[in-house]
Image: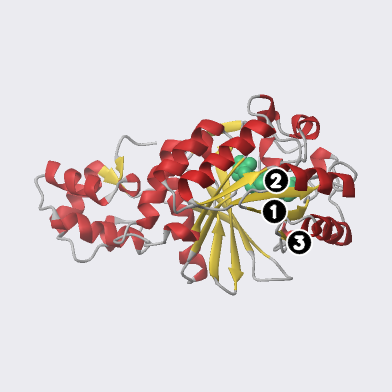
Amino acid sequence: MTNKTNLKNCTLKELENYLESLGEKKFRAKQIYQWIYRGVCSFQDMTDLSKGLREKLEESATIECLELLQVQHSKTDETKKYLFGLQDGNKIESVFMKYKFGNSICLSSQAGCRMGCEFCASTIGGLKRNLTAGEIMDQILCVQRDTGEKISHIVVMGTGEPFDNYENLSKFIYLVNSKEGLNIGMRNITVSTCGILPKIADFAADFPQVNLAISLHAPNDEIRNQTMPVNKTYNTSMLLEACRDYTKKTGRRVTFEYALVSGVNDQSKHAEELAKMLKGMLCHVNLIPLNNVQETGLKGSSRKEAQLFKDRLEQLGIPTTVRRELGSDINAACGQLRLTNSEDSL
Ligand code: SAH
């Protein structure tokens, strides 16, 4: 690690101040900012800056880039899973997915995670550290460079709990949304949380246009307490109350993620309990058969069971989709690639 300023963490305004502190003209900041968002990793490649300025920048600043360690290509669709190295040796992963509506990326917000969800591979090994705004953003630049394609949609659903790293997440959203940067619309960004309540309120106030997804995964406190330790601090009735407040403030629908685990939360009685719980809310349920993570011993429900669960929820008036499983042949489930490449691997 160096003591140099990583310009990837800077907003345009911060970059302007930085250039002024070097005795340079403010407009140079915009040129540098645009180079960064074109994916350039070295001051030497910023060809419209004088040699003198490039050298001056090199002395005090860096443009940190993630190191591309591994790419896995799905054989069944065009999904690609990336493993990146951070400057301090930690590893993170991102997933690139092609949809009819555009190209989407699933981003990590932390190296590791401390939320402890029973079914999740990222939980094994705990939290290493928060990612900086620049490291969250750089996953997009690296994947754009590798694929040669522009990314239009972002889901913060990779490793980590974004609301456990709220400050850097917020800065990241400003960076990708900025017109001179990637210019990705707020409505094309989705943030997923396991339910850190105070941050849901902050998020409604700070980013009312960004989509909110909640990892619910259970129709009652009994099951949720067993699988998601966060539920012991913020139980389901507190969580749903926070979601209702969110909708009141923003007018936006909440998406509930529900991973179906065979024999645990996928029975007809669970669908009925879930429907009762969500009745009257402006919401949508996203079902996904749990991706099997060897270490957890839990098993995902079959496609057929998922369809039955969806049908029951819809009969009871809850809009539901079964998420398409992209990249299941390349372990695209949260944390799996990082896990097989770390010392924490069992
Ligand atoms: N911490 C955030 C975001 C990261 S996890 C959150 O909890 O929402 C992204 C999503 O993948 C969450 O809904 C999470 O519960 C889910 N997930 C984790 N492990 C999974 C698995 N093995 N199969 C299916 N979904 C999983």
Q: Which residue is painted at 44% across and 59% down in the image?
A: 141
Pick the residue in front: 171 or 140: 171
Residue 138 as seen in the image, left or right of residue 29: right
Residue 197 as seen in the image, left or right of residue 117: left
Gap between marks 3 and 2 measured at Cα: 33 Å
In the rendered image, the residue lying farthest to the front is: 280
Amino acid, disc 1? Val
Amino acid, disc 3? Asp
Q: Is mark 3 on a helix, strand or loop?
A: helix
Mark earlier in primary sequence (1, 2): 2
Amino acid, disc 2? Leu
Q: Give how far across and how far down residue 137 sits, in percent.
A: 43, 52
Q: Which of the image's four quarters has the C terminus? A: top right
Residue highlighted by disc 1: 285
Q: Is mark 1 on a helix, strand or loop?
A: strand
Q: Give how far across and how far down residue 242 sits, in percent.
A: 57, 37
Residue highlighted by disc 3: 329
The number of discs equals: 3
Q: Which residue is painted at 72% across and 55% down in the image?
A: 318
